[in-house]
Amino acid sequence: MDLLMLRRDNFLFGIYLFLILSDWVGTFISMPLGVRHLVLLILPVFAISSFNAERRTLLYLFFLTILAILSFANENADFFNFSTGYVFTFLFLFVHIVFFNINLSDRRLIRLLKLIVHANLLMALPTLIGGLSDFDLRNHAGVFREVGAFATTMMCSQIICLFLYRVTEKRKYFNMAVLFSCICLITILKKTMFLSIFTWLVYAYFYLDFRTWFFSLRVWTIGVLITLLMAAPLSQNLAKNASYLNAVGTDSHVRLGMYVTSVKITGDYFPLGSGLGTFGSFASIINNPIADGHFDIRFNDLYYRYGIDDLAGNSEERAREGGMTILDTYWPHILGELGVFGFLLIFWFWSGKIAFFIRRKDTLNTMSCGVGFYICATYSAVMGEGLALIQPELPFFIFFHAGISGLLLRRVSNYGFSRNNPV
């Protein structure tokens, strides 16, 4: 056990590297589907030193499980699809519980975060170098699963670096945060660009006087320069999106069509939703597993009932070929499958913790204030990422928003949040 304690940070870093690189490695070596989720859930259990349950997360998991069981009574999915949907949808809660029970010292925790951001910077190089050929990072995912995952990782690295800057007082981490933020901006992914800028606003709220930074000539100068540099490529991207929307309309737009359908399902199955494994999730488009660790593609009947079985060309045939985009958005599947009650529970799991730290900002000690910033910035990113991508359910992002947050919350719970504890 003592040896494991000495190497616990290295162990978790190894898990993180696997989650990030597994998609790239998977192009050379075939991996069973779901292995990343199992690695993220099971391996960290071996780093647990003692069980100290966080009642808040357990209560959310309990109520969401009850809700899921009740919605299963709608009989829109069989037990295989329901259970697969349960694991994939609520994995972040299980991971949060596991990581909350891993007790790292401040030194080990900070070392783990340092390893992660330096590794992310190194892994970003292939994408950045590739982008020099056509000045468009979206065509060069590098070692990441796709450019959306690359951008999300850069944004999380920005948040971690700002946390490290405040708790270590080393200027280089602030400079690294600026670098990661610039990378987010040049991806021209609108959601990530906004969230990266929003992260700076959260940082300013926690650490800077509003009048000092809002009326700062330096801040406004940087803002104007960024606007001028990003205006042309961003306007081209917006024009392209507007042209696509005008051409296909709201109902035939992939993301908007999924939102519209989720609202219809929510109304028809109010208030519990259609049930896990029925709409907008991986579990809703698969059949029982077949040989070689693959799944047979079969859309749930709801896709045909609501006329989205070929939404923007996303048919079963296209899904079998691996080119579908119908699962690209997170919130529609939460709203459709879990209904209003489930949507509000998951939304409040993140927003409630944000509200907790915002209310206590002026009473937090150094470490707790850093944790508060990390939680508010990361949880905001989770909710924002889910508007246009499925990122909140991807294992590498769960490591950030459920795993690291669990480690940090466990750390501050050991000695309290108040400034009377000057840790």
Image (spheres, rainbow, N blue to C red):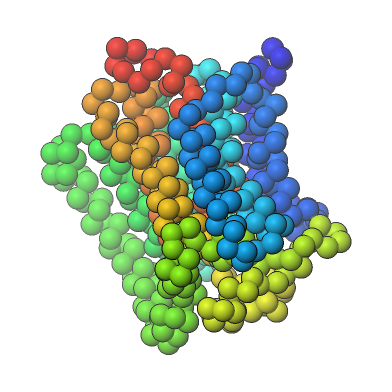
**Residue 284, position as x, y percentages in the image:** 63, 65
Picture quadrant where residue 200 is located? top left
Tell me which residue sits at (35%, 56%) in the image.
Answer: 194
**Residue 323, position as x, y percentages in the image:** 65, 73
Q: Quadrant of the N terminus?
A: top right
Tell me which residue sits at (60%, 31%) in the image.
Answer: 98
Residues 331 and 84: in front is 84
**Residue 226, position as x, y percentages in the image:** 30, 57
Q: Is residue 233 in view from this perspective?
A: yes
On the picture, is 213 further left or further right than 257?
Answer: left
Residue extending farthest to the bottom is 247
On the picture, is 197 further left or further right than 65?
Answer: left
Residues 229 and 256: in front is 256
State whether residue 111 is above or below residue 245.
above
Residues 67 and 172: in front is 67
On the picture, is 419 further left or further right than 253?
Answer: left
**Residue 283, position as x, y percentages in the image:** 65, 60
Tell me which residue sits at (34%, 12%) in the image.
Answer: 421
Picture quadrant where residue 250 is located? bottom left
On the picture, is 398 further left or further right than 204?
Answer: right
Residue extending farthest to the right is 291
Tell me which residue sits at (64%, 48%) in the image.
Answer: 87
State whether residue 359 is above or below residue 18.
above
State whether residue 159 is above or below residue 393.
above
